[in-house]
Image (tube, coloured by chain):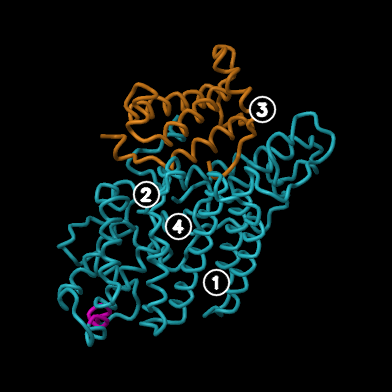
């Protein structure tokens, strides 16, 4: 059945399309209406809520993966109640009372955190679109609310237990990443050209902090989840680090940053993955080549006075980063990247339209 | 796994009933099983998959995917979708993201 079998080499778009299909199927089954209003049993209603929220909160990662903007607003407008924070044993087909939500950790806790974060992302995207430039205060407000919710959920997690630990690590990671990437996004939206608060020490520290768990294999308790790391490369954070390296090739942390980059580029961003992930990996390779060439012009470990040279080398005559990147990829033959130019309109969305990660993953 | 879409007590019965008597299972129940096999296989690394399943992970994934697609086709899923079929699709898509298709193809 061709619909379920997208071509192997194009898994990116396949997922995007199939996720859309799944939501349509869900709607055709009435999942967009709360089961209680449809007169279904408590059990059926709860099962349907899980499925519905799973499907609509999945779509978010698409922006990062494919540079496509998620157009559905179901996350913020859905009339379906959230699934309850309960253990599976608390619901059964002939139950006569609605389930009572628990305060402590359940297998649903991480799911609920994900839904909340996906909603926050949606709210942020809305703010970003509505006001230009959006205010940092409005961003912080959303982040703070999300953090309060997550903290409340994590209150009862015991890091000794692997599933709890997974919930803790992943939730904090996702929150940190949402905060970081939207902050960068907000800075970029202040206007074209370099911003003073862009390539800062705080930003690079935070970016490296976010990428760190990806090569930290010391946590044996979470080894079983390591497959998920490869499925979700950190495009935005990687892009930031490369930008930073272009602007500040002599940053005190540049060696550390390069180490992280080389790790990522020889693993999840490896060349052969270009096949499956398309233009954004190619763009990152091109940006990496640019950063490398800036680095070589100052000589490794060069100190002081090079920042502005690096910056002008990076920006050239262009005013916006996307243009620089775009020119790069098209014009730089050294990188031997074959990019379909038509896909390049998507890059702007990737650069500006950060969308939150897919929830169903563990990041470690 | 991270995001929970299943209900173990009832889904477990579904899965083992299908294994027990696949010939009388509905096509969409078969799809549900294939989706779970698929996600489970994706979560293993190559050597784990080989020692537990006795097959190359990539080969097995292609077989499971074929099984799933055929089940959907036989059940005419698009024209007659069911909650079970949609569950299957949802679980399959979770695993699907985790695949290095380039590696599977080669």
Between tags 2 and 3, which lies in front? 2
Q: Quadrant of residue B77?
A: top right
Q: Which hue belongs to chain B?
A: orange
In the picture of the structure, the residue carrying the numbered disc 3 is B10
* Residue that mark 2 sits on: A217
Mark 1 lies on residue:
A129
C-alpha distance separating marks 2 and 3: 35 Å
Q: Colour of chain A?
A: cyan
User: x and y percent of residue B76 in the render?
Assistant: 55, 26
Q: Which residue is denoted by mark 4 in the rendering?
A: A68
Q: Are marks 2 and 4 in contact (CB under 8 Å)?
A: no
Q: Quadrant of the N terminus of chain A?
A: top left
Quote the CA–CA distance across marks 3 and 4: 37 Å
Location of residue A180 in the rendering, given as x and y in whole percent from the top left corner: 47, 69
Dominant secondary structure of the magenta stretch?
helix
Q: Which residues are magenta?
A: A310-316
Is A181 rendered above or below residue B9? Answer: below
Q: Is residue A107 left or right of residue A279?
A: right
């Amino acid at each position: 059945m061709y619909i379920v079998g997208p071509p192997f080499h194009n898994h990116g778009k396949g997922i995007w399309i199939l996720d859309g299909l799944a939501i349509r199927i869900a709607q055709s089954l009435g999942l967009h209406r709360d089961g209680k209003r449809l007169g279904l049993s408590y059990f059926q209603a709860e099962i349907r809520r899980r499925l519905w929220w799973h499907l609509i909160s999945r779509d978010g990662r698409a922006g990062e993966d494919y540079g496509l903007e998620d157009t559905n607003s179901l996350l913020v407008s859905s009339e379906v109640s959230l699934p309850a924070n309960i253990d599976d044993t608390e619901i059964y087909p002939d139950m006569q009372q609605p389930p009572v939500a628990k305060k402590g950790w359940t297998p649903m806790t991480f799911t609920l955190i994900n839904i909340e974060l996906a909603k926050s992302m949606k709210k942020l995207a809305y703010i970003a679109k509505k006001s230009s430039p959006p205010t940092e205060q409005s961003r912080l407000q959303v982040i703070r609310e999300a953090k309060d919710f997550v903290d409340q959920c994590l209150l009862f997690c015991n890091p000794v237990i692997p599933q709890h630990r997974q919930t803790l690590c992943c939730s904090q990671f996702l929150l940190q990443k949402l905060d970081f990437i939207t902050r960068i996004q907000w800075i970029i939206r202040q206007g074209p050209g370099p911003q003073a608060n862009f390539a800062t020490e705080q930003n690079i520290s935070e970016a490296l902090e976010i990428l760190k768990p990806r090569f930290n294999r010391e946590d044996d308790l979470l080894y079983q989840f390591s497959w998920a790391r490869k499925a979700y490369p950190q495009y935005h954070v990687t892009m930031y680090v490369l930008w930073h390296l272009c602007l500040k090739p002599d940053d005190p942390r540049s060696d550390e940053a390069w180490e992280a980059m080389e790790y990522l580029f020889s693993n999840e961003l490896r060349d052969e993955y270009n096949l499956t992930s398309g233009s954004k990996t190619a763009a990152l390779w091109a940006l990496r080549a640019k950063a490398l060439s800036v680095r070589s012009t100052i000589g490794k470990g060069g100190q002081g006075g090079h920042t502005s040279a690096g910056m002008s080398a990076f920006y050239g005559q262009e005013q916006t980063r996307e243009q620089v990147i775009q020119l790069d990829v098209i014009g730089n033959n050294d990188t031997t990247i074959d990019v379909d130019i038509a896909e390049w309109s998507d890059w702007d969305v990737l650069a500006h339209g950060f969308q939150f990660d897919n929830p169903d993953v563990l990041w470690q | 796994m991270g995001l929970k879409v299943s209900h173990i007590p009832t889904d477990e019965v579904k899965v083992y009933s299908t294994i027990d008597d696949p010939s009388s299972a509905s096509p969409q129940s078969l799809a549900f099983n294939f989706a779970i096999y698929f996600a489970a296989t994706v979560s293993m690394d190559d050597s784990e998959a080989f020692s537990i399943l006795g097959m190359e992970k990539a080969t097995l994934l292609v077989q499971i995917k074929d099984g799933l697609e055929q089940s959907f086709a036989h059940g005419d899923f698009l024209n007659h979708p069911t909650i079970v079929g949609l569950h299957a699709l949802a679980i399959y898509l979770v695993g699907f993201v985790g695949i290095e298709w380039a590696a599977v193809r080669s």
